[in-house]
């Protein structure tokens, strides 16, 4: 009988186990959401939010143990207070979808805590009225519901964090399809395509798009032309300065690009490369090469040397080994490297703004920035152009998705 009692002491209902995890997650999220009230400068909601976080911490610390009816009653009082406080905060806030969403992080956990703590499994467990059959039923119930509740909690949390990333995108889409150039207003209150028509029918956007396309494709091609043989040489050959060169590539990445802006400008001016595609391509290649070389070197390390030795035995020279054996196997890594080089040039703003002073040579980031000035803000046009600029990037990621996964994972394990 002693062994049975010891086992019962070990048993904890799945509701308590789940609350121990979920209340911590809810506490962390509510602490983060306090920044919303700080940004709104709403002192009353901020104070209520801090009180809610304190109640979450107290509720988590007071979760009952076996044969502990007093702590269970304390938790019921705390969860009831938390529910009332959360409902009051929701009533004080403006009736918007965003406010309802952020207050659900306090409403839902408080409702679940109140419901589970007042339920029969926890009530019986805290009163220690467990028979052998009840103990067996509780273990089976834990095994059945534990994994399901854990999966539900993980998916709900992930969906909410995905929503944080999607909300700004929805806002930009709404501004792009709304009348006027205001950042306010309710989502979906109007619909128009005038901003897209203005951008697409204008001459500037097509010019900016062409410049970005030339510079980005040129950067990717030049970077690959240099990085592929460099990565292969660093992977296969031992030579003087090899380790120092690889370390220098990492060292360069530690410094922000703005510190080399003035030397870059002087060099470009001396060479006569200002307001030219070639100047930007060379500048972008310098910044993109370290990452490209390291990525390709890591992938080449995973290709067995035995394949190259077999090709040599078959009569191939070193160039044929590289072109007919190594390069076909390196297609995923080359595709990913080209994609990253393309995106680095496509999204770069500072160098393009510094080296190009003519509107005819603006790239898309610089051109989009010119839509917002100190005297006029064309937010609708800006949002529409931003969506158009993002479409090629999204299509590239969809097209290179398979290569992206293979290329990023291939260099992670050596041998």
Image (cartoon, rainbow, N blue to C red):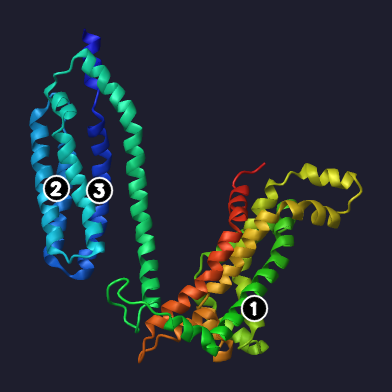
The mark found on residue 55 in the picture is: 2
Picture coordinates of residue 181, whole percent (x, y):
35, 83
In the rendered view, tell whether residue 66 sits above or below residue 95: above
Residue occupying image coordinates x 53% and y 75%? 348
Residue nearest the viewer, comparing 134 with 243? 134
Residue nearest the viewer, comparing 260 with 53? 53
In the rendered view, tell whether residue 21 sits above or below residue 375: above
Dot 3 or dot 2: first in sequence order is: 3
Cα distance in 3D space between marks 2 and 1: 58 Å
Q: Left or right: 308 with respect to 399? A: right
Secondary structure found at label 1: helix
Q: Left or right: 319 with respect to 45? A: right
Secondary structure found at label 2: helix
In the rendered view, tell whether residue 273 sits above or below residue 225: below
Q: Left or right: 77 with respect to 235? A: left
Q: Residue furthest right?
A: 315
Dot 2 or dot 1: first in sequence order is: 2
Q: Residues within 10 Å of mark 3 (few under 14, many from 20)?
A: many
In the rendered view, tell whether residue 239 sits above or below residue 76: below
Write down the residue under mark 3. 26
Picture coordinates of residue 31, whole percent (x, y):
23, 55
| Labels 2 and 1 touching (C-beta < 8 A) | no
**Res. 404 image quadrant:** bottom right
Residue occupying image coordinates x 16% and y 42%? 59
Write down the residue under mark 1. 214
- Judged by depth in the image, the label closer to the viewer, 2 or 1, is 1
Residue occupying image coordinates x 74% and y 57%? 233
Q: Left or right: 264 with respect to 317? A: left
Dot 3 or dot 1: first in sequence order is: 3
Q: Residues within 10 Å of mark 2 (few under 14, many from 20)?
A: many
Cα distance in 3D space between marks 3 and 1: 48 Å
């Amino acid at each position: 009988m002693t062994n049975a009692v010891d086992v019962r002491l070990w048993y904890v209902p799945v509701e308590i186990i789940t609350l121990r995890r979920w209340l911590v997650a809810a506490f962390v999220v509510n602490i983060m959401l306090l920044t919303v009230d700080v940004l709104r400068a709403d002192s009353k909601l901020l104070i209520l939010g801090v009180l809610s976080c304190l109640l979450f911490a107290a509720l988590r610390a007071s979760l009952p143990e076996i044969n502990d009816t007093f702590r269970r009653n304390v938790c019921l009082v705390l969860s009831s207070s938390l529910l009332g406080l959360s409902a009051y905060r929701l009533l004080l806030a403006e009736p918007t979808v965003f406010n309802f969403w952020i207050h659900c992080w306090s409403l839902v956990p408080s409702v679940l805590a109140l419901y589970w703590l007042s339920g029969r499994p926890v009530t019986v467990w805290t009163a220690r009225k467990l028979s052998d059959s009840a103990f067996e039923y509780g273990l089976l119930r834990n095994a059945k519901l534990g994994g399901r509740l854990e999966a539900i909690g993980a998916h709900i949390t992930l969906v909410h964090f995905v929503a944080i990333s999607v909300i700004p995108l929805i806002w930009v889409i709404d501004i792009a399809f709304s009348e006027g150039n205001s950042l306010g207003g309710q989502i979906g209150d109007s619909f128009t395509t005038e901003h897209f028509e203005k951008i697409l029918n204008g001459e500037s956007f097509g010019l900016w798009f062409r410049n970005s396309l030339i510079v980005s494709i040129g950067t990717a091609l030049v970077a690959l032309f240099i990085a592929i043989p460099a990565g292969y040489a660093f992977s296969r050959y031992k030579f003087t300065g090899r380790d120092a060169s690889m370390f220098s590539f990492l060292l360069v990445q530690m410094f922000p690009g703005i510190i080399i802006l003035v030397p870059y400008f002087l060099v470009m001016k001396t060479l006569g490369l200002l307001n030219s595609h070639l100047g930007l391509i060379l500048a972008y290649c310098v910044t993109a090469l370290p990452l490209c070389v390291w990525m390709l070197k890591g992938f080449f390390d995973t290709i067995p040397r035995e394949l190259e030795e077999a090709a040599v035995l078959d009569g191939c020279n070193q160039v044929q080994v590289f072109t007919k054996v190594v390069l076909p196997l390196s297609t995923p890594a080359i595709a990913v490297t080209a994609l990253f080089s393309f995106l680095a040039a496509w999204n770069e703003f500072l160098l393009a703004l510094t080296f190009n002073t003519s509107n005819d040579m603006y790239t898309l980031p610089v051109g989009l920035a010119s839509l917002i000035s100190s005297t006029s803000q064309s937010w609708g046009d800006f949002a529409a152009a931003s969506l158009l600029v993002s479409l090629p990037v999204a299509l590239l990621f969809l097209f290179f998705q398979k290569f992206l996964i293979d290329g990023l994972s291939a260099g992670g394990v050596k041998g």
